[in-house]
Image (spheres, rainbow, N blue to C red):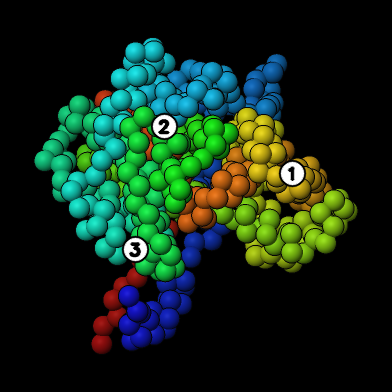
Amino acid sequence: MAYHSTIMEYAEKLAGKCIENDTISDDLFAKYGVNRGLRDVNGKGVLTGLTNISKIVSFKDEDGKRVPCDGELWYRGYNVEELVKAYAGEGFGFEKTAYLLLFGDLPLEEEAKDFIRILAKSRSLPTNFTRDVIMKAPGKDIMNSMARSILTLSSYDPKALSGTLEDNLRQCMMLTAIFPMLAVYAYHAYNHYENLESMYIHRPNPRKSTAENFLMMLRPDKTYTKMEADVLDVALMLHMEHGGGNNSTFTTRVVTSSGSDTYATITAAMSSLKGPKHGGANIKVMEMMDDIRENVKDHRDEDEIRAYLTRILRGEAFDHKGLIYGMGHAVYSVSDPRERIFKGYVEKLAVEKNCEEDLALYSAIEKIAPEVIAGDRHIYKGVSPNVDFYSGFVYNMLGIPTELYTPLFAIARIAGWSAHRLEEIIGAGKILRPAYMSVMKERKMETE
């Protein structure tokens, strides 16, 4: 849709008024003790709720002092590192961990089989949905395409507005099952109509896992290696939940608390996740790495790498934002446990794909970037790579187009969103309504 020149000119003309009247100075935030981004000066989040679903550990108390430690991520009382060790390589790690998040307990063998079977039976779309909805208005923004599909699916559900726990659970499981279809089909529609490539619409295989089906539906020849599927399965496990305080999960809790339905709630979460400050971080890492490859002549020269990273940090190179993407985290202090766990699988995949040279560059940056950041800026905690640093590299090795990076995040995170939605419904708490202090100056109407 082309912009209407008149309304665009009007917006450009009056945008300055918005800046003039909507800017609030940092001094006022400090004066009234309001934390920007719900984070205090030390990066600690403002407590807004309680959850029994997951936990992040980044500091430990030692002799009454808060001491930074290697990060930990826990799902329903289990360390995610132990879950990955237990389920990785079995083929259905994501599904078994989703069961844990939804129902609170690790599935027994028969429970896991039943849950996997139910998800497989749920991997179907209404008649002609792919043609009439997904292929109707394709675009590069797959997250928007998915959001449109999610809202449209409510029209096919006679109990879309049901407030019962059972219906909400059914809807959450159904969306978890079909998210890979919504993402991959939307990409193929875009790739066909916008990029003029061939169209592939492969039906999911009920005997395959979420990770296997994603790769199978994406690729023209439907083939993949066990290593590829295993690494993607681990990636889904590590991305499916993160403490409850992240932006999209908080959005899920806020919208759920208003009494809104599952389809609208998950669409709101999708809208949050697609933001580049949240789910799009791994794309920025990939763009930065491409820039480094172009501008650093010798990828083995640590001094040359250090010099260019310094230029990036000072806003002199890449996107001039002064950020080394994939480094540091809002919560973790010493290390991101997801990155620590994931790196071992990244290394194995890099060997299979003959990408050891690229891996060496990533490893060098992982070592040098924290030193550069620590030397150039005053920081309150350590800086280490986060999971986004390697996830884009893995998706690239898997041949996954960048348009699907954030949707793949959503395919994993739908499990966590669903668990938090159900916990919010069961808790039946008050509507989440934070307070804002008005700093508006009162004015009087001028009369003639």
Pair 2/3: label in front:
2
Neighbours of disc 3 within 10 Å: few (<14), some (14-19), many (20+): many
Q: Which residue: 42% across, 72% down? A: 18
Q: Which residue: 41% across, 32% down? A: 209
Residue positioned most to the left: 158
Circle 2 SS class: loop
Q: Earlier in the sequence, mark 1 or mark 2?
A: 2
State the mark number for residue 138. Answer: 3
Q: Are marks 2 and 3 in contact (CB under 8 Å)?
A: no
**Residue 81 appears left or right of 2:** right
Pair 1/3: label in front:
1
Q: Is residue 13 above or below residue 244?
A: below
Residue positioned most to the front: 221
Neighbours of disc 1 within 10 Å: few (<14), some (14-19), many (20+): some
Circle 1 SS class: helix
Q: Which residue: 22% across, 41% down? A: 261
**Residue 262 appears left or right of 331:** left
Q: Earlier in the sequence, mark 2 or mark 3?
A: 3
Q: Position of residue 426 (x, y in %)?
A: 26, 25
State the mark number for residue 356. Answer: 1
- Cα separation, mark 2 vs mark 3, equals 27 Å
Q: Position of residue 19 (x, y in %)?
A: 47, 71
- Cα separation, mark 1 vs mark 3, equals 36 Å
Neighbours of disc 2 within 10 Å: few (<14), some (14-19), many (20+): many
Q: Is residue 4 above or below residue 268?
A: below
Q: Position of residue 448 (x, y in %)?
A: 25, 87
Q: Are marks 1 and 3 in contact (CB under 8 Å)?
A: no
Which residue is labeled 2 in the image?
A: 209
The amino acid sitting under disc 2 is: Ser
The amino acid sitting under disc 1 is: Glu
